């Protein structure tokens, strides 16, 4: 559930360019979402000013996160207000990027994002960013602030977790929304994928993707699909059963397996491969529990 706060890379800049639909098409999609609650609506917004950094995410089902710290719930009236803000500000006609020009010569090569807004209505998405340096858009800054101002009060009744283990347990029993679980799994067979392709599996916001992977080679585009809440809860339950939050970060294994799990602000990565020196606690029993969890993820997300 990463909110875009790092320097603007070429890939991120390309995403802004791609997320630039015809303004009339996106305006109609937003109007449709405002009139019909069954039309999916999602939002990612973050902004840094001189005083603070604020960020929020809203998923189509109404779940969301404030600052990656707590889960929030967005009801119909807040959703309609967010859409109204986007429409009244003319967001469908915003440029993909503002700023980012006339950097000082000594500045880093990558441009730094100050604010971002990514909105989805139905199957149409628009993404716009404001980068440091160059001409800034006051309209963009006002819209980002208005969206964040609507969402910030919801954090007072938000639900959080003290650590990853607690967050996974809350997901497994339904106390946290399944949209909040983010998973990235990289699996390479013995030999590093030279002969047999490996796989990269991702899960975020009830969407999963699978991509064949050979390091150093051109790889096919990822295949995306919906993930059910039940599948996500099953994965969270398997992570709890495996004691993922307390596993050593390095485990013995064949080939190469890297698993990153994130819920709100809590994240952990575990790598299994043929290590020459075992980490403390990296027992065969711990490796077996990790392998069982990986199997549940691959089976649940169609990566077998």
Image (cartoon, helix red, strand yellow):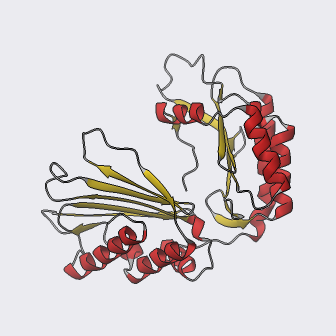
Q: Quadrant of residue 98?
A: top right
The residue drawn where x is 13% and y is 54% is 191
The image quarter in which residue 189 lies: bottom left
Q: Quadrant of the N terminus?
A: bottom right
Residue occupying image coordinates x 76% and y 30%: 93
Q: Does residue 76 appear to the left or right of 179 in the view shown?
A: right
- Give residue 125's position: percent from left, percent from top: 65, 43
Q: Position of residue 237 (x, y in %)?
A: 46, 80
Question: In the picture provided, is 272 more to the left or to the right than 247?
Answer: left
Give the camera-side residue of 189 and 283. 189
Q: Nearer the viewer, residue 16 or 67?
A: 16
Please give the name of the residue rendered at 31% of the width and 51% of the height, measured from the top-left corner.
212
User: Which residue is rendered at x = 75% and y = 27% of the image?
Assistant: 137
For the C terminus, the quadrant is bottom left
Res. 149 in view = no
Percent from the top left, x then y, of residue 130? 66, 32
Residue 63 relative to residue 259: left or right? right
Residue 198 position, x and y percent, is 26, 55
Quarter of image, res 99: top right
Q: Is residue 191 visible?
A: yes
- Foreground pick, 274 / 11: 11
Above/below status of 28 relative to 209: above
- In the displayed structure, 100 sits above or below 282; it is above
């Amino acid at each position: 559930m990463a909110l875009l706060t790092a320097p603007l890379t070429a890939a991120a800049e390309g995403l802004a360019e791609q997320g630039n639909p015809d303004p009339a098409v996106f305006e109609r999609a937003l109007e449709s979402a405002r009139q019909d609650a069954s039309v999916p609506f999602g939002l990612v917004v973050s902004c840094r000013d001189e005083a603070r950094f604020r960020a929020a995410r809203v998923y189509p089902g109404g779940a969301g996160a404030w600052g990656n710290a707590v889960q929030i719930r967005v009801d119909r009236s807040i959703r309609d207000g967010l859409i109204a803000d986007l429409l009244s500000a003319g967001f469908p006609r915003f440029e993909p990027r503002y700023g980012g020009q006339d950097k000082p010569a000594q500045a880093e090569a990558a441009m730094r994002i100050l604010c971002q807004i990514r909105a989805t209505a139905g199957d149409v998405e628009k993404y716009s960013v404001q980068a440091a340096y160059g001409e800034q858009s006051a309209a963009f800054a006002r819209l980002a602030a208005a969206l964040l101002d609507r969402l910030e009060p919801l954090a007072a009744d938000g639900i959080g977790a003290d650590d990853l283990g607690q967050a996974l347990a809350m997901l497994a029993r339904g106390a946290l929304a399944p949209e909040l679980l983010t998973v990235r799994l990289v699996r390479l067979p013995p030999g590093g994928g030279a002969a047999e392709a490996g796989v990269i599996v991702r899960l975020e916001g009830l969407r999963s993707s699978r991509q064949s992977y050979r390091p150093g080679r051109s790889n096919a585009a990822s295949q995306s699909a919906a993930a059910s809440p039940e599948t996500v809860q099953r994965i969270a339950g398997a992570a709890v059963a495996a004691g993922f939050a307390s596993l050593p970060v390095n485990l013995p294994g064949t080939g190469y397996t890297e698993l990153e799990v994130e819920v709100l602000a809590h994240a952990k990565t575990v790598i299994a491969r043929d290590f020459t020196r075992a980490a403390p606690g990296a027992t065969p029993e711990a490796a077996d529990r990790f392998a069982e969890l990986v199997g549940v993820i691959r089976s649940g997300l169609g990566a077998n």
